[in-house]
Amino acid sequence: MKNIALIGPRGVGKSKISKRISKITDLPVLSTDSLAVYETGGISIADFVDKHKGDWRAFRDLEFSILQKLSTAQGIILDCGGGILFDVDENGEEILSDRKVSILREIAMIIFLDNDIDHLVEKVSSDKTRPTLNSKKNYKDILKFRIPHYKDVAHYRLYLGEMKKEEAAKRIIELTDIH
């Protein structure tokens, strides 16, 4: 059985929707962000990035390591962190990660959960628990870069708009034909 990987920006609802899919299908959910915290011995992502002087490169390498470990998993729902498709170049800029995309496409049916940029910016701006992605760019600019990549990598795109999480879960189950 192939896996499902939910990708998309922060605040789109990947975690809540993956849990609803799990409830319907009895498939386990693994969160790349939770696995990253586990791998670091319980250090939060924000603290891990701070420990590396705000450089996301070490965290992106950790995500790659996690995906490698998951490469033999079967029948899981993967709740991917918003930056799962990206690495950081030598100038500190985000770039598409061929190495992570390759693993994801090999192990999972990838679903891009999409919503309006302004809605996502508003939702995330009030959440102070999320680490700063880039001290030089605002979230809207980051989304403008990331969204075309989410679209290109995904097997399916599901625009959520005002869709309820339960409805989104059922649509994903239909799209992927998992049970």
Image: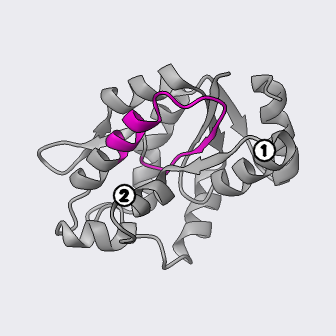
Segment tinted magenta in the rendering: 63-83
Image quadrant assignment for residue 179: top right
Residue 141 placed where, x, y %? 40, 53
Disc nearer the start of the sequence (1/2): 1
Reading the image, the residue beneath label 2 is: 39
Does dot 2 land on a helix, a strand or a loop? helix
Q: Position of residue 59 (x, y in %)?
A: 29, 54
Q: Which residue shows up at 43% across the image and 43% down it?
A: 84
Left or right of 61 in this view: 45 = right
Q: Which quadrant, please, contains the N terminus? A: top right
Residue type, numbered disc 1: Ile
Q: Report the residue at 55% width, 63% height from top.
A: 121
Q: Is residue 163 among the parts visible in the rendering?
A: no
Q: Residues within 10 Å of mark 1 (few under 14, many from 20)?
A: many
Task: Provide residue 137's location: percent of width, then percent of height.
Answer: 32, 60
Q: Tell me, yes or no, whether the highlighted magenta stretch contains residue 130.
A: no
Q: Residue at x 46, y 55 (%)?
A: 35
Q: Quadrant of residue 53?
A: bottom left
User: Tag on residue 21?
Assistant: 1
* Towards the viewer: 175 or 158: 175
- Of badges 1 and 2, the one in the foreground is 2
Amino acid type, callout 2: Glu
Q: Is residue 52 visible?
A: yes
